[in-house]
Amino acid sequence: MSEIWSLGAAEIAAAVRSGELSAREALDAHLARVDDVNPAVNAVTVRFDEAREQADRVDERIRAGEPVGPLAGVPFTVKENIDVAGHPTTHGVPHFADAVAGADAPPVRRLRAAGAIALGHTNMPDLTIGGNITVSQLFGETRNPWGAIRTPGGTSGGDGAAVASGMAAIGLGNDSGGSVRLPAMYCGVAALKPSYGRFAMDHRIGGSDPTLASQLFPVDGPIARTVEDLELAFGVLAGADAADPRTVPVPHRGPELPKRVAVCADPAGLGVHPQVRAEIGRAADALADAGYQVEEAEPPALADALTSYGTLITAEFGQRWPDIRGLLTEESARNMEVSMTQQPPTDLAGYLAATATRFGAMRDWAAFGERYPLVLGPVTTERPFDAEPEDALRVMFGMRLCTATTCLGVPAVAVPTAVVDGQPLGVQVIGPWYREDACLAAARILEDRFGTFTPPQPRHRPQR
């Protein structure tokens, strides 16, 4: 058997169920890997002491001949803004350092019920506002394990770096504009951004429910080293749940769709890095060779989706910004301040108009999907780079396809395609509402063509 920490979730679960490997052995191997590489990467912020007890319970069930779930013994990490019972949900800032969660968030509960072992929390930017870097006041900076650039992407950069470097088989992050997809591209792993209402979530802060934009846009989603592992996590996380009234009882798989793909390398024609364009071209060729009809076509209403997203976000954040701003450093506040400069907070009439604009963009996208069920495009039109606060607009414009698809609530899968000059690159496949299965199937084709690239041995020296 290969090093246990290098195995995927599906491999670990199969070995644990068969008795070839114990859940305790799988967990201990990953904890040893954390000891080895986390000083250089700084992705795992807090380890959960109860993890070994959970692993032992899985092993006891197997010895007793009792059924165990499809993720039996699989170690996973959890982003710092997702509740894990008995541990603070810090959001990376001192204000919430002692905000101990009374219960697991729904996706944590579901993963544990499937036999997975919650290993620890992972780093994120302060309140998820730091853009494509992963730096928090409480835990410092997370580094990209590849070493070609410093940042692992954001805002689920801790999970991206942990999974890429072999500290966990699955990372549970969230995406509110590309926040699992960007770390997947930067770290050379895969990520699923589900449809709105597909996974149950609980994003209350201090007991307060989120406002409309924060109800509609952020979705929890898995990061893994293979598409097979994303499929396994999807099967566990999807489905209606009384804990979240947004979730819908949609089947995991839908009917056969026309095998047509719209290729959109440069959304809205604002420019794309030649290396990013080249990877999209290679991915398009792979899908064409697999029998898809591939055509260049830009989805409609991108500008409307981007405008309505920005309007809803800044209108709601603008109302609370003085309080939020006090929890942030100058650097971590800069990203939202640039957003509010670009899209100033509006009045009630403007806010209501944005809700209508969003609905019209959803209708136009649905009509486009009748012709092109899948869209192949960039996670970001920029080659991965270390962004400074003054680069906030460049980052936002580069991720415009992620932002638009978040606004519309459609699913997407990010998948790596190559390592160029020591840095992973990749693409995303976007599908119709609640057709994660179609996205995953296309992503599996790309993975079969291009392979997987992780885990690398982290190249950064331990930070002082």
Image: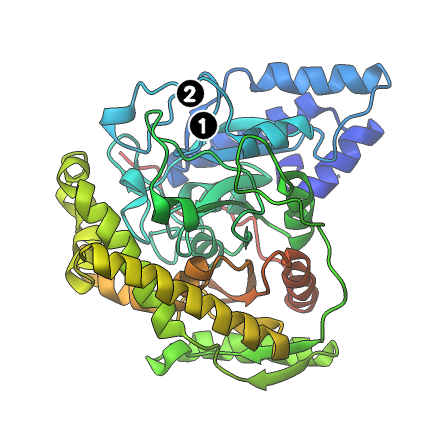
Q: How many marks?
A: 2
User: Foreground: 48 or 420?
Assistant: 48
Task: Determine whether 414 is above or below 63 in the image.
Answer: below
Residue type, label 2: Ala
First along the sequence among labels 1 and 2: 1
Compute the Cα span from label 1 to label 2: 6 Å
- Residue placed at 60% from the left, 17% from the top? 52
Residue type, label 1: Asp
Residue 399 visible at all: no
- Residue placed at 57% from the left, 42% from the top? 247
Q: Which residue is mark 2?
A: 101
For residue 301, which quarter of the picture? Answer: bottom left
- How crowded pointer 2 is (Cα within 10 Å; few <14, some 14-19, many 20+) is rated as some
Residue 329 in percent (x, y) is at 16, 40
Residue 378 in percent (x, y) is at 46, 70
Mark 2 lies on a secondary structure that is loop
- How crowded pointer 1 is (Cα within 10 Å; few <14, some 14-19, many 20+) is rated as many
Q: Left or right: where does residue 117 sit relative to residue 146?
A: right
Task: Please identify the quadrant where the C terminus is shown.
Answer: top left
Residue 117 in percent (x, y) is at 61, 27
- Residue placed at 36% from the left, 82% from the top? 269
Task: Determine whether 430 is above or below 159 in the image.
Answer: below
Task: Determine whether 407 is above or below 88 in the image.
Answer: below
Q: Which residue is mark 1?
A: 83
For residue 266, which quarter of the picture? Answer: bottom left
- Residue placed at 32% from the left, 43% from the top? 128
Residue 288 shows which numbered tag?
none
